[in-house]
Image (cartoon, helix red, strand yellow):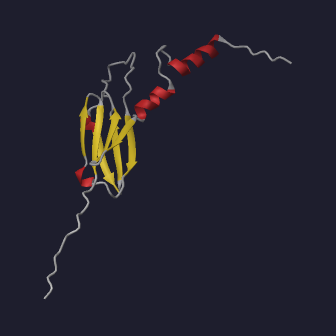
Amino acid sequence: MKTQMNVSPKMIGNLLDDVFGNDGLLMSRGFRSFAKNPPVNISKSKEGYVLQLLTPGINKELVHIDVVNNVLKISYEHKEAIAEDVQVVKNEFLVGSFERSFSLDSKMDVEGISARYDNGILSIDIPLKQEEQPKEIRINIG
């Protein structure tokens, strides 16, 4: 038994809007979540870790990096100020906020964490604590 389904142009339009956005540009849910949850690269060396977040077009003054209870929290919030007498006709910039959190190991030197922003990449250096070298104490025999 065959079932026939009537598909209206509106249904097709809604489906295309879900995939491409209502302006025909690729603005899928995956792309929108990219802006809310920027991808990260993490690398490790003998000196420590480097986190790199892909964050093009952000204002670095609005980024907050905090460590609380051995959790590194990176957050950003941007609110676009638009005058009351201005009507936005089209806005394709993905502006808003994000928050990423990373658990830190007790071997990481939280006091030595540093960050820089260059060409759309937020880099956070997390050094490892220096291992204490055992002290050698010579004891003279009396």
Rendered location of residue 90, percent (x, y): 40, 16
Name of the residue lying farthest toward the bottom: 142
Q: Quadrant of the N terminus?
A: top right
Return the residue nearer the eye: 18 or 26. 26
Rendered location of residue 64, percent (x, y): 29, 43
101 shown above or below 6: below
134 shown above or below 6: below
Q: Residue at x 32, y 33 (%)?
A: 78
| 110 horizontally vs 104: left or right | left
Rendered location of residue 34, percent (x, y): 43, 31
Name of the residue lying farthest toward the front: 141
| 2 horizontally vs 91: left or right | right
> In this figure, what is the number of numbered marks?
0
| 15 horizontally vs 84: left or right | right
Q: Residue at x 34, y 49 (%)?
A: 72
Q: Quadrant of the C terminus?
A: bottom left
Q: Residue at x 37, y 35 (%)?
A: 97
Name of the residue lying farthest toward the top: 9
Return the residue nearer the eye: 86 or 23. 23
Residue 123 lies in quadrant: top left
81 shown above or below 48: above
| 138 horizontally vs 70: left or right | left
Residue 7 lies in quadrant: top right
Rendered location of residue 115, percent (x, y): 25, 41
